[in-house]
Image: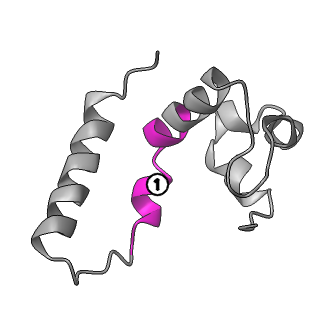
Amino acid sequence: MLVTPLKIRTLQRKLYAKAKQEPGYRFYALYDKVYRVDILHHAYRLVRSKKGKPGIDGVSFEAIEAVRIRAHREHPMAVIVNINWRVS
């Protein structure tokens, strides 16, 4: 089982607390937080641990791997930028 790193867990807790304190608050600028290298690496490890089952968008781990080549290790955001994500 993968354990969420403390730095990511702290961010999750802060965002959760803000949302509970101010239900009407809108988080317009979360991309800078989601694109953090530590978060992308942890998300990648989570997907690998679940054997790459597709999420809500239907993109399989094989599709991510096909795009990835070496980009994920050099710059994890490249994986997200190079795939056309769409909600199904």
The verdict on residue 39 being magenta is: yes
- In the image, taking residue 40 as reference, residue 75 lies left or right, namely right
Residue at position x 80%, y 64% from top? 84
In this rendered view, identify the residue nearer to me: 64 or 77.
64
**Helix, strand or loop under label 1:** helix
Instruction: State the scheme by which the image is colored.
Output: one colour
Graded by Cα atoms within 10 Å as few (under 14), some (14 to 19) or many (20 or more), the crowding at tag 1 reads few
- In the image, taking residue 23 as reference, residue 71 lies left or right, namely right
Task: Give the residue at the far top of this rendering.
Answer: 1
Amino acid bearing label 1: Val
Q: Which residue is mark 1?
A: 34
The verdict on residue 31 being magenta is: yes
Query: Percent position (x, y) of residue 1?
Result: 46, 15
In this rendered view, identify the residue nearer to me: 14 or 35.
14
Q: Give the magenta part as a residue range.
A: 29-41
Query: Percent position (x, y) of residue 54?
Result: 75, 43
- Rendering quarter of residue 43: top right
Q: Is residue 68 above or below residue 46?
A: below
